Structures are given as structure tokens and as C-alpha cells.
Image (tube, rainbow, N blue to C red):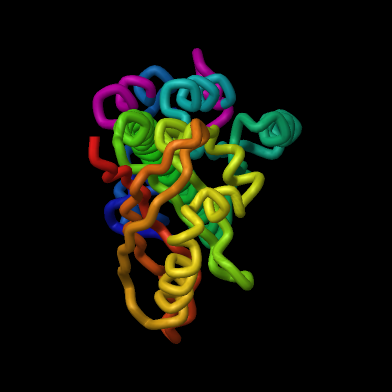
Amino acid sequence: MSGQNERVLFVDDQPEIIELIRRHVGGHYDCVYADSGAAALSLLDTEGPFAAVVADYSMPNMDGVTLLAEIKRRSPDTVPLMLTAFADLDIAVAALHQGNIFRFLRKPWDRSDLDRALSNALDHYHLVQSERRLRQELAEANRALDAKVRELDELNQLLEYWVEFSPAVLYSADCSGDAPRLTYVSKNFARLSGRERTEVIVEPTLWDRAVHPEDASERTRRLQDFVQSRAAEHSLTYRIRHHNGAYRTILEAIRCIRNPQGKPLELVGCWLDISPH
């Protein structure tokens, strides 16, 4: 992948090498040139970052390995490549194995080799940039998710507080079996019935047995008719026996959640004490 907007820094102390590079690839990339390691670092500070840097190994004062290692430290995403003569081949291979350079090119190079090396370097640069963006986006998404989870936790705590002090007891029941089976009862069940809510979950018939004998059959019939119909909502009143022995009048409001064919899946409802006080 190459394009007119790619910025590549070439570093070599020999003007004839810079001129040769300019002729070979100058028309295909946005090229910047430096004649020393110090000049290259100055350009990195003033005109960087660069997608790739191609540096000669044999330069006075600062060799290519030292320069590319410093560029990697200052600009981690910049892809380092090294030009080296045959005599410096062992040094270039060692630097490659140590991860200090991405590719090395021997002098004199073949024009197609230089172009291929630059194309691979820019592909690698784009990959690194894409991965960095994805990591940032993932981190931002995780932060947003964490914030949403905290918000939901706070909301859930607030809802539990409201339910706990509400006069209406909320419940849900699974309708997949022969008869509805309680799966959830809110914490304020104890105030309504005098029993802990865990009792009615463990012993699902407890609520049915608490219904006044004179009201039991009518309540059962109406609930069965409602579940078997296609209605969405229903309400009924009846009496239940509190754990202390007294009877209380209950208003039960129910909504039935059904599949597209009308089959009942779940009941959600509430029990409200409407006894005269």
C-alpha cells in the first residue's frame, strides 16, 4: 500500500545515495531527507511523526542502529528500515533479530526491492495504527460499559429500595409447566403475609393454600381462564390468611407475557392489600 500522502524519512550522509533514492521512489511517497542522525532527530521533532524511516548504518557520529533505536523510542509506531553495505550485513541481521529494525536493504539495492520494502513497511504502519485505534475504541467502549453497569447497579439499588417500602408485592411466575410456578417475589412479601419470601419460592403452593376457602375455587378458575385466553391483563380480588391468622383482602393485578402464537410464557403481577383499616 503506498500513496502520495505517506511520509517517509530517508537518512544517509552520502548525497549521491539521497539523490538515487529521490529518483527511485521520490515520486511515489512524501519523502523527507536528512544527511545525519542528528538532522533526522531534529526533523522527527519538527516534522514528524513519519510512517517509516530508512537509515544508512554507516554514518559518522551516530550509526543507523543507534538512530533507529532512538526514533523507535520517540515514535513507537514509526517503522524502521536500514540500508547497509555487504560488510555490515552481520550487524543488520543482528539488529533485525533483536527487533530494532523492520527490514534491511543491502547496497546497492534493486529498485523493486526498495519499493517492496517500503510498501510492506507502510502496510505494517497502517496495521499498527489500526490496532491502536481499535484498542482505544475498545477501552472507550469498556469505560462506557463500566459506567453503564454502575448506573444500572445504582438504579437497581434504588428500585429495590422503592419496592421494599412499596405496599404492592411484585412477583413473576413461569408458565412453561402445567401450572404457573413462582420464580420471583419482592422483599416486602413479609409485610403482606407475615412470611419470608423464600418460603413461597421454595414452597410454591404456600400462597394458594393461604387463599380463603370460600375464594379459592373462584380464584383458581379465573386464573386458569386468563392464562388460557389471549388476554394481556387481568385483575381479581380475594382474601388470604396472614401468618398471624387474620384474613386480608388482596387485589391481584396480572400481565401475561405470551409468544407470537399466544402461548403463555410468564406472568408478572402484584399483590396489594386493600383491606379496610
Q: Nearer the viewer, residue 114 or 245?
A: 245
Q: Is residue 244 above or below residue 121?
A: above
Q: Residue furthest top?
A: 61
Residue 49 visible: no
Residue 189 visible: yes
Residue at 25% across / 25% down in the picture?
Answer: 46
Q: Quadrant of residue 89?
A: top right
Residue at 33% across / 62% down in the picture?
Answer: 236
Residue 48 is inside the magenta segment: yes
For the C terminus, the image quarter is: top left
- How far across and down, in percent of the image, does residue 198 sit? 59, 38
- How far across and down, in percent of the image, does residue 74 sit? 42, 22
Q: Nearer the viewer, residue 103 or 107?
A: 103
- How far across and down, in percent of the image, does residue 170 sit? 39, 46
Residue 54 is inside the magenta segment: yes
Residue at 36% across / 62% down in the picture?
Answer: 254
Q: Nearer the viewer, residue 154 or 221?
A: 221
Answer with left or right where residue 82 lies relative to residue 1. Answer: right
Q: Nearer the viewer, residue 275 or 191?
A: 275
Span shown in magenta? 41-64
Q: Is residue 16 above or below residue 64?
A: below
- How far across and down, in percent of the image, does residue 109 sit? 58, 51
Residue at 38% across / 25% down in the picture?
Answer: 40
Q: Quadrant of residue 88?
A: top right
For the N terminus, the image quarter is: bottom left
